[in-house]
Amino acid sequence: MEEQFEQHQPFTSFPSNEVNDMKPIYESTTVDIESLASPASINLKPPPKIEQNKSFDDDDDFSNKTAANRSNITPMKATVYSVADLQMATDSFSFDNLVGEGTFGRVYRAQFNGGKVLAIKKLDITVMPFQSSDDFAELVSNISKLHHPNLNELVGYCMEHGQHLLVYDFHRNGSLHDLLHLSDEYSKALSWNSRIKIALGSARALEYLHEICSPSIIHKNFKASNILLDSEFNPHLSDTGLASFIPDAEFQAAEQSAGYTAPEVDMTGQYTLKSDVYSFGVVMLELLTGRRPFDSSRPRSEQSLVRWAAPQLHDIDALDRMVDPALKGLYPAKSLSRFADVLALCVQPEPEFRPPMSEVVQALVRLVQRANMTKRMLDGGDTSRGPDDQDQYFI
């Protein structure tokens, strides 16, 4: 047997169609290994072909747009909302409906007639100073092309009376940042299984942006507060496509989240696919330790999560001490070690040594495959367990 677990540390598998059908994690079936290994299994849909002179990641394209380019904007695939409708749904964007504030503006909870709840992002014009309605229309057009189960997809928009509002699905469990850092009640419920699930789904979102979209899209703003969790703890990456519309230097000046930025971005001011990989590794560290990427309240040697954790990731004893106390020891050592191996590659200081996101996805899938194989060996074909026994088992 490849894996050796203590008796008080059994495990469970991912559901067989978790990535396809977004099933809750409490299903007791094992993962369909072949379907997980195939990108087609999650119905990834490359966006419609984008004109070669309209790259998300070319700062020169941003600064050199012409009237001719704007006239060829692809029709938007999103619902148009009126300002009046959004004001009514948010109670005139009241403080009570404010659910968050990030780099690009504030997000409000909006409840419409019939009970439907959506999230409204009110863009900050000081961060995204659109020169005309065509600029905003181009942004909406680009974002509306992106479709993946682990993206927070655009539902609609509003551009009346000089307003720049984006409408998204509302996810009741908030952000990963909130669950890990703001609510003890929620963080206790975030099991090892859930953390692996969140890491894998988030990795698939970046894989889609980096390797399936053409041209590739650099997120630039990958962080725990931009990973939204639905009622089944499926991750949905938000703010996709927004940072790519702003030149790197301007975005770097606006972004205030310490601890996520790759070293080369601090030095050169330029974002790349590999800087996204670094940020993903930081989020994996948050999932592992429960700590913030930067915490000024800790001793100086522990303030930067990467600097504190990276040297210890291959020390089994140190790794065990680093684990989030909220897990209460309920995790298998082999799975923990492999998880640490993956994130250690992602936070390499040299970008050329970081893996592409497709390799990260494959590594996380293999982690699940090994867990399923061991589970079958330990079960010995036992199918007598009921759903209520599921909480005893983990990856």
Image (tube, rainbow, N blue to C red):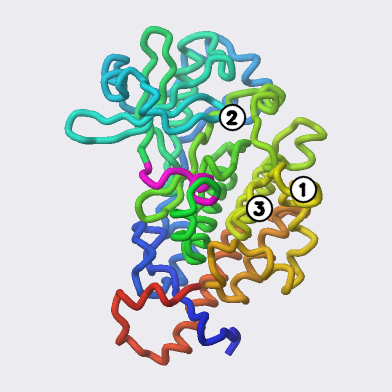
Instruction: Determine crowd level at label 2: few under 14, some 14-19, many 20+ residues with C-alpha closer than 10 A.
Output: many
32 lies above or below 117: below
Q: Which residue is mark 1?
A: 351
> How far across and down, in percent of the image, does residue 389 sit?
34, 78
Quadrant for the N terminus, please.
Answer: bottom right
Q: Secondary structure at mark 2?
A: helix
Cα–Cα gap, marks 3 and 1: 12 Å
Which residue is identified by label 2? 243
Task: Say which amino acid is labelled 2.
Answer: Ala
Q: Secondary structure at mark 1?
A: helix
Q: Earlier in the sequence, mark 3 or mark 1?
A: 3
CB atoms at circles 3 and 1 under 8 Å apart? no
Q: Quadrant of residue 119?
A: top left
- Write the residue at 51% across / 83% down: 8
Query: What residue is at 30 percent from the left and 87 percent from the top?
Result: 384
Instruction: Determine whether the residue tagged by mark 3 lies in a helix, strand or loop.
Output: helix
Q: Is residue 19 above or below residue 334?
A: above
Amino acid type, residue under disc 3 in the picture: Gly
Q: Which residues are magenta?
A: 171-180
Q: CA distance from mark 1 to mark 2?
A: 20 Å
- Residue 392, given in percent of the width and then of the height, sits at 42, 77
| Labelled disc at residue 281 | 3
Q: Residue furthest left?
A: 114
Q: Earlier in the sequence, mark 3 or mark 2?
A: 2
